[in-house]
Amino acid sequence: MIVNLSKKILALISLLLVIGFSQTAFSQTINIIPYPNAIKVMPEEFVITRATRIIYNQQDKDLAVAITPLILKLQKAAGIKLKTTNTLRSHDILIRLTDNITQPEGYHLEISPDNIKIEAGTPAGVFYAVQSLLQLLPTEIESPTLAKNLQWKVPAVVIDDAPAFAYRGLMLDVARHFMPYSFLEKMVDLMAMQKMNTLHLHLTDSQGWRFESKKYPKLTTIGAYRKGSAFNTTYDYASRPNDTLYGGFYTQDQLRKLVAYAQSKFITIIPEIEMPAHSEAALAAYPQFACLDSTGKAFPYPSQIQNEFCTKDSTFIFLTDILTEVMDVFPSKYIHIAGDEASKVNWRKCPICLQRMKDEHLNSVDELQSYFIKRIETFVNQKGRRIIGWDEILEGGLAPNATVMSWRGEQGGVDAAKLGHQVIMTPGEYCYFDHYQSLDSSEPPAFEGLTTLATVYGYHPVPDGLTPEQAKLIIGTQGNLWTESVPTPQHAEYMYFPRAIALAEVAWTINKQPYNQFLSRLLSYINRLDYYHVNYSRHMFDIQMTTSVDSVTKLVQARVAGVPNGYYVYYTTDGSHPTVNSLKYTGPIIITKDAEVNAGVIYKGILVDEVNKTFTINKATGRTSTLVTPPSKSYNKGGEHAWNNGILGNDNRFNDGEWLGWSGQDFDGTIDLGTSQYMDTVTTRFFNKPSDWVYMPQWVSISVSDNGTDFKEVARQADLQTNTDGSHNLKIGLGHISARYVRIVAKCDGIIPKGLPGEGNQAWLFVDEVEVE
Ligand code: ACM
C-alpha cells in the first residue's frame, strides 16, 4: 500500500507537461477538496439529465458500491434515476476498471460535453473519482430533498489523481466522552467526501471502556459508567447513585455494523485498546489485573490516568482474550494497542513485575514496557494482523513489526523510520484537534495548544533528513480528537471542521496549493457541510478583534484585523451572530456602554469567521491603574491594565489573554478614578478551576482613599470557595461613598492543601475585571 512517491511525482510531471496546468485559462473555479494532482479545465460542460445512462460491470459488487453515492445523490437531490446500459451512447457515463492505473486509489476522470468517463485500477479509485465528480456538481447535490430548477452541470475536465499518502485518518476518543453510534456513521460520511480512509476509534481509557466484551462483561457494566467528570473520574460502583453515572458503550453488533458501513465508503475502522496504561476503567472492573502489594491490595494509583496493568501472566490472558474479540469484530490490518504515557510507578515496586524483570533479564521499566508490547505484538501477528502504537513504544526497544504513531512531535516517527518501521504522523502541533483553533474569547474550553486551520494546512508529513527509502515509510497522517473537554457530537464537529478538511488535503494532494486558494475552495465546500448540519467552526481566516482605550476620552475602541481583501465584516453589539443586515464594519467601533460585540465575515450569506468580546463600561474603565505585584509572565497577555480595560475575560477559560494570573501571590491593585466620586459597588471577577490548580481567593478587601496614600478598608468578604469551574463575579456593596482611589486586595489561596488537585503546590489566582459603579 505504500505509495511510491518519486515514481508518482515523475508520472505527474510528465502528465502536466502534456496537458498543461491550465486551470487559470478559464474563469471556471474547480472547488474540489482535496485538490486533484493534475487537472485540466475546458470551457465546455456536461449536463446530467434524466436521459443520462450509466455503463459499468454490474457483476462487480465492489464497483457497484463505489458508484452508489452518485446514484443515490442524483436520485435524492436531482430526482434523476440513472439507467444502466451496456452500449456507450453520447451523453452517457462510463465507469470501468483498468490495469493502466496502477496507484491503488488513483483514478482518471474525463468530462467532455459528450460523456463522463471514470477509470481506475480499483473500486476505491472509482469511489474517489465519484467524490470528485460530486464536488463538480452544484452543492445542492448534497441536499437530502429534491432541489428544484437546477441544471446538473459539471465543467469539462481531465483529472488524473492519486493520493500522496496511503493512510489518511482521523482519530475519535470515545472513552473520555461517549459519542452516540449515529455520530460515528456521520463521521464516516463526512470523511469519505474528503477521500479520507481511516477512522481510528480510541475505545478504552481510564475514563471509560466502550467495547462490549462477551467474556468480560464487567468491562462495560462497571468500566463504561463513571462517577465524576473526564478530569476527575472514579468507579465507586457500589456507592454511586444512578443519576450520577456517565457513560455508554458500543455493542459488538453495532461495531460490526459500523465496520460494514465504513467499508461501503472505503474507510477502515481501526480499534484502539489502551495498554499498559490509561487502564483505570478496566482495572475498576477487574482489579486483579492491577499491581498488588504483598497483602494482595492494589497499590494506590500514582495518577488517575496513567496507572497500568500488572505484567503478570493473567493480564496477558485477559488482554489477548480481549484482542481476540476485538479482531473478531474489526477486520482491519492494524490493531492499535496504544503504549502511551505509562507512569510505570507501580511496576517499580510490584513484586511480580520486579520478578518479571529478573526472569526476562530486563534492566529497566522501559524494557519491561517493551517486553509487554512485544508479547502483545507476537499474539496480534499470529492472528495475521499488525500493531500500531504511540511513539512511547520506541522506549526500551521497538516491537519488530510495529507501526509507530508519532504524537510527541515528529522525532518518534523519524526514529522509527530510521529503524525501518512504518510511521503515521500525528504531531500535536499540527494534528491535535483538541487544541484551540483560534484565540477568540468565544472558543469553548479546549486543551492549551493552538492549532489553527492555517497551521494544519501548512503541515508536511515527511520530515527533512530522511532518505527516500525512509520517507516512504511515512505512510500517512491523522488528526486526533481527544475528548476530555468535548462532551457532545456537535462540539466534536466544531473541533474537527474545518481542520479535518485541511488535513485531508495535506494527506492527499502532492502539489499543495497556496493557502488562499484552499480557503476559497473551502468557502464553497462548507455549503455542502450545511446539508449535513455540521457544526463547523467559524474561524476560516482567524480574524482578530483588537482593543484600545483612547487616552483622552477614556473610551474603548474595538478594531477588526486580519480580514483578507474583498471580504466584508458585519457586527452586532447584543451578542447575536452578525448577518448581512447587521452593521457594516468600516472602522473602529467606539464602545460607550456595556456590549457584547460579535464581528464576522459573511461570505455568500454564510458566517465564515467571527470574533467576540464582551465589554463593561463603568467608572473604572480605562482609568489609570497600578499593581503591587505584576502578573505571571505566562498570564499577562492582556497587559497590566487588563483588569480594568473594559473587556471581560472568557467565562469558561482563563487562558484567553484577558485574565491575569498570579501563582502563590496576592492581587493588589489600585484604580485612580480621576476625581472623587460617589460609588455603591465594586465587582471583582475570579476564575475557579481546581483541576488546573486555579482557586478562588481566601478573601477580598476593598479600601478607598482621596489622596492615594491613606486608605481605609470599607468592605471585606471571605468564604469564597466554590465547586463550580469558571468565572465568578463578586459584587461587593460599599454603601453610597465618595473617593478618588479604590484599592482591591485578593488574598491568594497559597499552598494547595492535601486532598485537593495540585496539593503542595502554589495555587493560581486569576483576576479580570474590576468594575466600580
Ligand atoms: C496521546 O496523546 N497520549 C497519544
Image: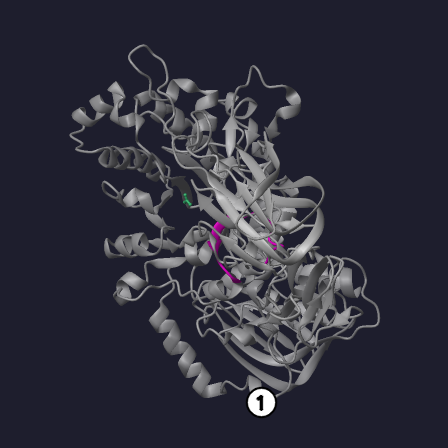
Q: Can residue 688 be seen in this view?
A: yes
Q: Name the residue under label 1.
A: 25
Observer-nearest of 766 and 747: 747
Q: Pinpoint residue 177: horizontal percent, then vertical percent.
A: 57, 38
Q: Pinpoint residue 719: horizontal percent, then vertical percent.
A: 59, 29
User: Quadrant location of ligand 1?
Assistant: top left
Q: For the view shown, which residue lies furthest in the top direction?
A: 295
Q: Is residue 265 visible?
A: no
In the image, the segment drawn in magenta is 440-452
Instruction: Tell me which corner region of the image, top left, top right, bottom left or bottom right, holds residue 429.
Output: bottom left
SS assignment at label 1: helix
Residue that appears at 35% across and 67% down: 4
Residue that appears at 48% across and 38% down: 748
- Total label count? 1
Residue 213 drawn above or below residue 467: above
Observer-nearest of 438 and 113: 438
